[in-house]
Amino acid sequence: MVHKGGARSKELMAAKGVTEALVPAALVPHKPKLLANAKTNNYLLNALMAMAAEDRGGNLGIGVDEDGFISEQAIACVAFLGPDGVLRAPPFERILEGTTLRRADEILEPIPGLFSRLSYEPVDLATVREAVEVISFGGGTVLPIVAIDASALPPGDPGGAGYSSDVIKVGDGTPGPLFKALYSLINADFLGTAGSSEKGTSKRFLDEIPYTAYVQTG
């Protein structure tokens, strides 16, 4: 399967933010539980979600299941920071348990006045609309979602009522403070430079690659 899009700079997306698109199950079926909970090389539905999102100016898409609840992105998890400081992510029963999100949950500490805790719970479209930040977790990093196209939601969709526009603006439309804190923390953790505490670094899991052993001399 070939589709347009090509490589994107994650550094640029982190700096400016990403526009995403809601992809309801009526447009791309939700993955069956077996595929959602297993690592496989069957990425057909993932690719279809990304293609549907790209058609609406998105990137990986944000799935909406048959009951109007958020599922996941094509190859990432997604979480929504509410005005109450709770970061809400869909539970893992029907989606892949993302290692980047799990690692963030392990190392992210409360930030007074901004973030209190991460909660795994069903996320409806009202929660999406009220979110002050939306963060994508995948590929060992995080990205800020600053706008969400909702045009694919059909009339009468369980989560579609109440939208005055096809585009949901997230916060002030720029990467937010929780994302910035997470981005620095996750990248430092990945590189093993987040500190010496057992909780705050992945360095104990990293082995230095002896590149010099593969260099031909003479």
Image: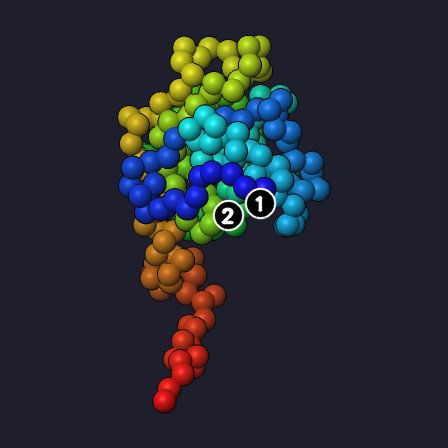
Q: CA distance from mark 2 to mark 1?
A: 8 Å
Q: Position of residue 15 (x, y in %)?
A: 29, 41
Q: Position of residue 175 (x, y in %)?
A: 31, 35
- Front-most of 61 and 126? 61
Instruction: Tell whether 96 sits left or right of 162.
Output: right
Query: Quick check: marks 2 and 1 in contact, CB under 8 Å?
Result: yes
Instruction: Choose top left, top right, bottom left or bottom right for residue 43.
Output: top right
Q: In this rendering, does residue 41 appear at all?
A: yes
Instruction: Tell whether 173 sits left or right of 34.
Output: left
| CA neighbours of label 2 inside 10 A, class few (<14), some (14 to 19), many (20+) | few
| Residue 72 against residue 196 in the figure, above or below | above
Placement of the C terminus among the 4 image quadrants: bottom left
Placement of the N terminus among the 4 image quadrants: top right
Residue that badge 2 annotates: 102
Element type where label 2 sits in the image: helix
Q: In this rendering, does residue 126 appear at all?
A: no
Residue that badge 1 annotates: 97
Element type where label 1 sits in the image: loop
